Image (cartoon, rainbow, N blue to C red):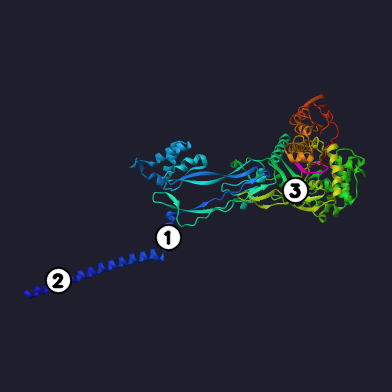
Amino acid sequence: MRGDTTRAAVQNEESRTRELSVRLGIVTFGFVLFFVAIVMKLLSIQVIDVEKYREKASRQYLQDKVVQAERGAIFDRKGILLAESVQRISLHADPHIICNTPVNRNGVKVEEDRAHEVATLLSGYFGKPRDHYYSLIKRADEQQRRFVWIERSLPVDVARPLMEHPVQGIWTEKEQHRYYLNLASQVVGLVNTDNKGISGLELKYDSDLRGHNGLKTFQRSATGGRFLAAGAEQVRAEEGISLELTLDADIQAITEEEITRAALQSEAKGASGIVMDVRTGEILAMASYPSFDMNNRSNFRTEQARNRPLADAFDPGSTFKIVMAAAATEVLGMTAEDSVDGHGGTYRMFNKTISDHEKLERMTFRDAMVHSSNIVSALTAMEIGPDAFYDYVTRFGFGRKTGVGLVGESSGIVRKPETWGALTLPWMGHGYSLTATPIQVLQAYATIANDGVRMKPYIIRRFLGSGGETLREFSPQKEERVVATETAKYLREEYFRAIVEEGTGRAAAVEWISIGGKTGTAQKLTDGNYNKGKRNYISSFVGFFPVEKPRIAAIVVVDEPKRGYYASTVAAPAFSKICSRMVACSEPLKEALGLQAPELAALSSRQVAVPLLDGLRLQEAEELLEWSGLRLSWRGDRHGLVALQDVESGSMVEAGSMVGVQLSLAKGGADREDRDVQ
């Protein structure tokens, strides 16, 4: 019995021992598995997935920051800044760091809301209420956002206190902002908020101006500090190139002022003006009305970027008679003294009537040009013939872009002779059945001014490096000899000088300077028709000076003037003021023209052109004279229309002068304006 008890005890002991061994084995196996897992995890971190974890750590402690390259500047020909990039400072914060860092008072950490202290500091620096900054930081922290803008686009001087005395959890970022002189807005163009060009030269040369951005890698400390990461590659930003333009800021400002005045006085839809050096093709001014505030981009609309001198293609009207006159001289051998027939002011051609606004009969070809006879121009074009006429049209540069170096240029429309109808050639003879831009019309007159050689217009003078060194220079380009030198001189002296001295261009005259040029008041094509009952006209004057040896050509175009819409009273006076003011402020032009003190004083005088008042009501005549800076005296029936005026339209008189008119119930004298109505 005792033996059985002993055996049972031994068996129980062995059972417990086996159980303990199993348990110990399980525990040991668990430890082994745990150890293997740890080893495998370490192996994964240190060897297998080392790059993955390095990248994850880098994302937490390293931050790449793009360093924006400084955008190149834009200068005029004299070094005046038209566009530049100015450094501004923006501030951003990590609300978590600000709100979870204890306040340190005399070396002792105090548990209180640090956001209050930071908000008070910011309010003292930048003037906004403390609650503004406090709510900004606290709201972002409650939303668990680690980034919030505190201030944007501060001047460097304003942000300097915070830059010199950093606050934990707040960082400064350098940004660029583009500032403009507010000249030549459609030419220079704009950048958007990302500093990318969206119009004008800023768009066309965006890749050159913006340069190449750099890269800096920062390391973030546990307390939120930031410093350049040791060993990380730092890429330096490369500044963009700068542009030096052919524009002259003074001439540009004058041109903008005068076309704006012309547009406002005539209640026009728009206006444009260009000034060119005829010897080189350099554009000295290019202006559009309406313009826009280049430094207030919030109100900018895309249509305001339209550069009218390049984009507006219209029937040029009588300004196109330069082509007819040149071809007549060289193809037909026609001279200024040749006799031509005006047919009494009306002429039927292919069941259509061509009209002049004077009942012209037999006259010289010179007189036909001075009085701008549409009939003579149409008949002369027919005599020249389609092929020869088309040849001169294209040689003058019509029907293709000038390639001036700006976006948005139109080529205009010139159809080939094989597509012409019976009326195309005679209508082209006086400036219809084709379209042209202001710069194309100006280029044609600049060609005659340059002794028959067409120059390529251009507006970029040089590409400049960051140190002001010349990277690339643009030179004048002769494109084609259009007419012989003798022909060009003959046209200038016999026709275009006479038009200004005796004809419809008298208001373009400038005392002491010989001006040659041409007016045009062409009807606009609206919905496929020329609506005679509506005043939808393009009024223009294009010319050059001095006639003997021209240096400058310019054009003024006024779109849909509602008051005094004739070119002689709308465009020609603006041309005159541009030229006189330009010469008065340009030492090289004064020198070239040999002007002395008395002549220069005359250029600065306040002379204005007398507008054509024929057929206007008393109130209309009074308003038109008032806009022109003149006064009205009248006699006759106050309910009638102007029949006579004491001072001939186009005459230059002192501002404030009195102009007398005779009113009659019957409409007065014939309209002598160069108005090209079909």
Residue 656 badge: none
| Residue 589, x across and y down, in percent | 76, 40
User: Around disc 1, counting alpha carbons within 10 Å, would you say few (fewer than 14), some (14 to 19), or many (20 or more)?
Assistant: few
Element carrying mark 3 = loop
**Amino acid at dot 1:** Arg
Viewport quadrant of the N terminus: bottom left
Q: Is residue 20 above or below residue 469?
A: below
* Residue at the image position 36 percent from the left and 64 percent from the top: 42
User: Around disc 2, counting alpha carbons within 10 Å, would you say few (fewer than 14), some (14 to 19), or many (20 or more)?
Assistant: few
Identify the residue position indicated by label 2 in the image: 13
| Residue 77, x across and y down, in percent | 68, 45
- Quadrant in which residue 45 is drawn: bottom left
Identify the residue position indicated by label 3 in the image: 281
| Residue 69, x across and y down, in percent | 56, 50
Viewport quadrant of the C terminus: top right
* Residue at the image position 30 percent from the left and 65 percent from the top: 34
Q: Main secondary structure of the magenta part?
A: strand
**Amino acid at dot 2:** Glu
Tell me the distance, in whole angstroms, between the alpha carbons under discs 2 and 1: 56 Å
- Quadrant in which residue 416 is drawn: bottom right
Magenta residue span: 543-559
